[in-house]
Image: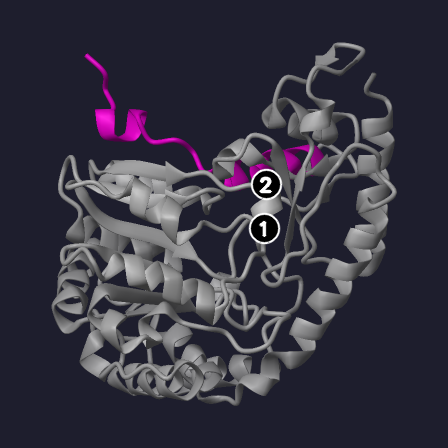
Amino acid sequence: MSKLSDRINNLAESQTLAMTKKSRELQAAGKDIINLSIGEPDFNTPDFIKEAAKRAIDNNFTHYPPVAGYLDLRKAISEKFKRDNNLTYAPDQIVVSTGAKQSIANVILSMINPGEEVIVPIPYWVSYIETIKLAEGIPVTIPTSIESNFKITPEQLKKAITPKTKMMVFSTPCNPSGSVYTKEELKGIADVIIQYPDLYVISDEIYEYINFVGKHESLAAFDFMYERVITVNGMSKGFAMTGWRIGYIGAPKWIADACEKMQGQFTSGTSSISQMAALEAVKADPSVTTEMNKAFKKRRDLVLGLMKEIPGIKTNLPDGAFYIFFDISSYFGKSYENYKIKNSSDLSMYLLEVGNIALVSGDAFGDDNCIRFSYATSEDKLIEAVKRVKEALSKLK
């Protein structure tokens, strides 16, 4: 008899965190590893947000907060939704959680029954599939390609829907592809979803402020979709607040109530100090994120320019987030010394051990032809990182 549950035995480890852990171990052993495996801005949290956290400590915000988050913060998030997304969520339709990852888990665990299907476009963020499986749901994936800019079409979506379909989960801007759905493309998806009265959508918008093509568009902003969409966002990416662990949802009240109930049994309210820091960030004009956004765009262009010099790889033009999801399938079947490259996992391990660079294999995101390269680090490191990729790949014959 197994001492561990089937639930945990069947749960895959997060491959982004696994690669980050392995690269840190190699760094600790003295190897010069450039770690581009984790999705984390290299900027520090802005000072005005840190000052709010210090004030919160001095003002004794050190007691249990409400499960769904402080009312002041939920009011501010409500105003942010209206200001930035033209979405009207009352404070009691908002639940603040310990990161957007918990927000997504709350929704899936609150809504998905065993055997119900959840549509997930490929490539997807690593934790979507495992969370669906944890709820005993059935992930139904829709493939895309670099030629389609990693976006699904309404026709593909309609074909994937069955009588068991309960939900769809997707992100825009997308992790790992950086693809951003336009308003017209979202309308095409919405027109399909609305035909099925019991079909809901988690719209993961955590990369909202890292967008290089103009205004961010929210799926729930279409009036006819409002009751069908759970909008997920958080502080980690746009405000460089990864360690503060703050995410939130805006949703129909009955879904928000269910998520509050779920969270009440798992973690209760998230850190009181982090909430006070988030309050200051949410109230700020979004222009405070502009400089970071400009830096990410500059880095994107730098990396794409350098990658053009590497034979045999293909890239799209990511319009948001801070990743290049590049196609490396032309290297499959090649080898160097004891390394034989059969898939993206082999190649990412080869790049780590031979090239001293940590990236994440595409199979973690559902597309084994690609590897994810995070450009959320300094330009000097990025130049060196692409150089290492180029040199390591040139050894494969």
For image coordinates 88% across by 43% down, the residue present is 309
In screen coordinates, is 358 left or right of 77?
right
For image coordinates 34% across by 76% down, the residue present is 221
Residue 392, horizontal then vertical, whole percent: 82, 29
Please identify the quadrant where the N terminus is shown.
top left
User: In which quarter of the view is residue 184 placed?
Assistant: bottom left
User: In which quarter of the view is residue 35 placed?
Assistant: top right
Q: Nearer the viewer, mark 2 or mark 1?
A: 1
- Residue 341 lies within the magenta run: no
Compared to residue 338, the image places residue 320 above or below, namely below
Query: Disc 2 to disc 1, how far (Cα)?
Result: 27 Å
The dot on residue 52 is: none
59 and 127: which one is in front?
Answer: 127
| Category of crowding for the residue at label 2, using alpha-carbon neighbours closer than 10 angstroms: few (below 14), some (14–19), many (at least 20) | some
Where are the magenta residues, as a range?
1-27
Please identify the quadrant where the C terminus is shown.
top right
